[in-house]
Amino acid sequence: MELFTRMSTFIDKLLTFEVEPDQWRHLDVACGAPPTGSYCDNKIRTFKYTAITFFPKSLFEQFRRTANQYFLAISILMMIGEYTTLFYSPLSPWSTVMPLMVIVGIAMAKEGFEDMKRHKSDRAVNNAPARVLAPDGSESTLRWRDLKPGHVVAVRDREEIPADLVLLWSSEGVQAYVETANIDGETNLKIKKPASDDEGRPFVPSVAGAHETKFDLEFEPPNGKVHTFEGTFRPAGAAEAPLDANSFLLRGSVLRNTGEVLGVVAYTGKDTRLVRNSRAAPSKLSELERVVNNIIYFILGSMVTLTTVSLIAYLVFIGGNRKNFWYICERTNRKRVPSLFTNECDVKNFPPPGSLWPTFFILYTNFVPLSLYVTIEICNLVQSFYINFDLEMYDDISDTPALARTSNMNADLGMIAHVFSDKTGTLTQNVMTFRMCAAGGVSYGGPDHPLSEMRAEIASTDCAARDLATIMGVCHTVVPEKNEQGEVEYRAESPDEEALVDGAAQLGLAFATRDPAGITLDAFDGERRYAVLAVLPFDSARKRMSTLVRTPDGVARLMCKGADNIVLGLAKEGDEGCAKVGGRDVLQKALADFATEGLRTLVLAQRDLTDDECAAFQKRWRAAETAAGKGVDRAKLLAEAAATVERDLEVVGATAIEDKLQDGAPDTIAELAKAGIKLWVLTGDKVETAVNIGYSTKLLTPDMYLVRVPAEGAVAGDLGDYGVTAQLEGLVDVVAKAATLESGEVGSSSSSLGNAAANSDHLALVLEGATALEAILGDDRREQLLIQLASSCKAVLACRVSPAQKRLIVGLMRRKSPDKPITLAIGDGANDVGMIQEAHVGVGISGKEGRQAVNNADFAIAQFRFLKLLCLKHGRINYRRFAKLIIYSFFKNIALVFVLFWYNNDNGWSGASLYNPWVYSGYNFFLGLLPFCMGFFDVDTSSETLLKYPRLYAAGLHRMDLNVANMAYNTVEAVAASVVCYYVPRAFYEDSGGIWNHNGEASDVWVYGTLVFTGLVQAMMVRAAVLVDIWNPATQFCAVFQVLMLYSFILFMAQTDAGVTKEEPTFVDYSYFGVAYKTYSSLLFWLATLLLVPAIVTALQLLMQFVHLEYFADINDIGREIDHGYLDGEQAMGKGPVFSRCSLNSFMKDALGCRRPDAESQVSKASLAETFGSRQESQRLGVVDSESHTGHNYDHASGESFFTPATAPAAAEHA
């Protein structure tokens, strides 16, 4: 597979002609004049194939599949055997080549059809009209595809930007608004500014005067950075000015709230930011495909073994019976050949005995079902429709159905072992509400001090509360927009900002307007105007935002809001910086109280600057903004400039925002936990907030020990790991001891935990990103310790994690865990894309943070609660469907091949086939419809029962159906079935008089072969009928049609005249002519094929099922009994093992060493309590019993905060 991957990459590069530019670009622009320079066109190409590349690339893609490679190799071997004398091919190569061509052709046609839709979409985009400036100042129309760098383009409100533009002029003065949801998933409006001089005047004064403007542009080479841009604007006869992202309009963004803008094209086509970020999601090999590939490798190994055994048997047989074969005229026996055959022997060129190895290999070629992958693909497609049209997963509020964006992951949903979830917008609604705040030493929003009291205080006095509300109303990037009804709506970069602006309005300071000069607030005493001098934007590294304004009374004031540990670290030393909030201790208590309520907190601060300080900062900030050229780190210069004013802050208060839980999120988490799925919540919140949300969502329960890493009060130490290494080693050891105590075994150690042998529902792990994960990720020893510990815990909560850490955590469990668990990541924002793409299965939530997560996911749902239906219902049903389909597909082919093996035992191991080649090649088609019915309709347990008893999810979680051990067991049963299918007809055939009939007609090998073949097909049809659970009209039709197709094809092959004229008839296979009449006229044929063979094979099947159900029933069998009302579900679904240790299947798993750990190895809370030791030792290990410990320990400034929970807080429904 690696070889084919490399070849695929090479072909992609060979057929793609791109040169990565590395030189800064220069454009001499005269508005309206034809552009100069040679650059790529503005076409967008999302299609995969062209007319020239379709056949080679698509064909190569098809032969990346193991089964197609196998049948291609077999076809080549058949060709060599048929058309050379190297060895003999018992089958016609065209009997394999033709079906392979049909299957590959169908798959290629599907690829081509899908690519045609991409071509159509590309044509619609590329031929869209764009308006460009003409030399006389008028506008002319060009197609998007014809735009070139240097064209000046006019774009109107709500139109899409056709290329990457540098903004020259806006109808709104010195600003324009764009929406970039198509690019980064953010639905807020972003402010853009035209290229302007030092005094803020745009270089292009108006549309009418634009055609007189000439300028030179120098800017960075094309890249994929959507948030940055560097360049220089050099107008004719004026000083040059720098260009940054504020003047850069991205292709794909939409102009909003702006009448019209002019922009000069900078990048086109494949050079635009949109195209450079439009990479396809990484190709994922589903677990189902991986298991099928492993089964194919197992089958190929069996096939090689069977071929070798056949060759050895031939050599032994020939060695002992050579003297009896004088009539065959072998080369080694020519001395004994009578003269009658001498001439014939001289002419023939018999191959040496060793050449029979490929002969046997070709004979047994149908070990692998030819149509398997096509069957799986079509079943996947149909199952995707079931997900898309499931009304139970339809959200009527947002009018959003579930969507399967990738069809080959359906069965993987039934095998999920670890779920990694974002919090904000995933477990919560991302609907932020201003709930509480702290100012002047008082916490407002509670029953003692409602927000109305704060509003009255703001209106009456100039106090800290007024400063807090002012910062909430001024320090933001919110844009007001009027809707169709004329009402003002806020468009914010995040729901948090919108909640703060709404909160300011509640407190009497309503944000009214924003223009290039500043912001206006509607206050209780009239309008208040704040001139905005500079905006220091938020980013993930700064974790804060600041705005420098001139207040109505003329004071230059810096307003700042951000994470508590960041802002408090920038405040004045001691209590001086927190005087307005009653001191640091008072603020700490307020923050802890807010966190206990599960609220999101921000700390707000301000600083007054002198006029000289303000002027100096503005000069430095402007210089940093305008810094340009190679080697200039503008971001670093801006950070250094911001640091000169973001210091010695005066904290004015803190805000608390409620993010309501999604409906059904707690119940969904609880049900997934009951199913045995381990849950991870990865959030950027601080520990207190995250832990309390954990209790609210039922991720954490009161009977759990919380293991906090690093432990409370940990310091970096000499290793810089905050004691994490020693802590993890100690935790792994004590959990292993608890498992030993539970089982009563002696001599266990921490190494016994390496394969997650010890699990406990009473352990939850709390990780801190800035300390623990920084120390763990990237260190192999610590990573393995974390994997061992996390695998023993019921839930994991990672706090203050970055998007990069989310991706690394998912990758760690996916690739380095010994169990290789199937992972699922679910999120709703652009910051979740990394972990969604890293996981085996990615699920995106259609939330309020754009569609980035959805666009990169395998499945999309509107609410977190639908994850239960997606996994426990669709995942489990699809897994069992495919398990049954795949095992049956291999079963029937193994029986087919072993019949040939028994036949060769009778014919002296000659390598001859018992079946006519064309009839042989139709085997998978005669038995192909019922497997489709299994994949389309089969449901062994109703969805109501599956959702009521989540433990039934164990079927896929523990691979109880689809695994190599089960395949080995079914192989043994298939061999037994083949014995019946061959030897029963053989016995009847011999007893009925052999090949000579009473009328002197002969029954040759094709007659006998047809008898055996038809009996085998009928036996496999009956086996499929027994396996099928749902008998609807479609299934009934397929069963009948399969029988008719079998007998019709045999009749067709025996009588078809393919000749051009009646005088010279030629048949598809002349040797098969008349066989159908001979067989169909025999009573023995009908007795054997319709009754005896199917009855005996089915009796064997039913006997095995009876023994299994009666003595070795597993949890799936119990689920079916419950579903049919034969068992009491509550009593039957106890804590027992999910499958019997004594079953034949379990024996095969133990023999092959592939048993997976299951729910049997549970560690009780009592065993954990005994091994954790004293309170002091527990504290050293970071272990907290949520039922006995109280209080908070919150280090506000360091960012290394840890939570010691009190009695588990009430699971407040923040909904």
Image (cartoon, rainbow, N blue to C red):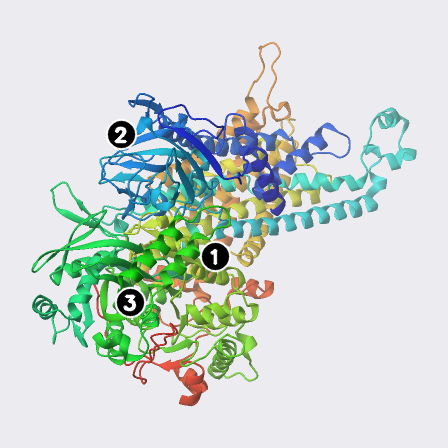
Q: Is residue 788 above or below residue 110?
A: below
Of pointers 2 and 1, the one earlier in the residue sequence = 2
- Quarter of the view holding residue 580: bottom left
Q: Is residue 863 above or below residue 1087?
A: below
Q: Secondary structure at mark 1?
A: loop
Q: Nearer the viewer, residue 601 or 1023?
A: 601
Q: Tell whether 624 sits left or right of 18.
A: left
Of pointers 3 and 2, the one earlier in the residue sequence = 2
Distance Cα–Cα, label 1 vs label 3: 32 Å
Q: Pointer 3: what residue?
A: 697
Q: Is residue 1212 visible?
A: yes
Q: Is residue 9 above or below residue 1166?
A: above
Q: Pointer 1: what residue?
A: 961
Name the residue rendered at 21%, 59% in the picture.
Answer: 499
Q: Secondary structure at mark 2?
A: loop
Q: Is the Cβ of the residue at disc 1 closer than 8 Å to that at disc 3? A: no
Q: Amino acid at mark 1?
A: Asp
Distance Cα–Cα, label 3 vs label 2: 56 Å
Judged by depth in the image, the label closer to the viewer, 2 or 1, is 2
Name the spot of residue 503 as percent of width and height, x first: 17, 61
Judged by depth in the image, the label closer to the viewer, 3 or 2, is 2
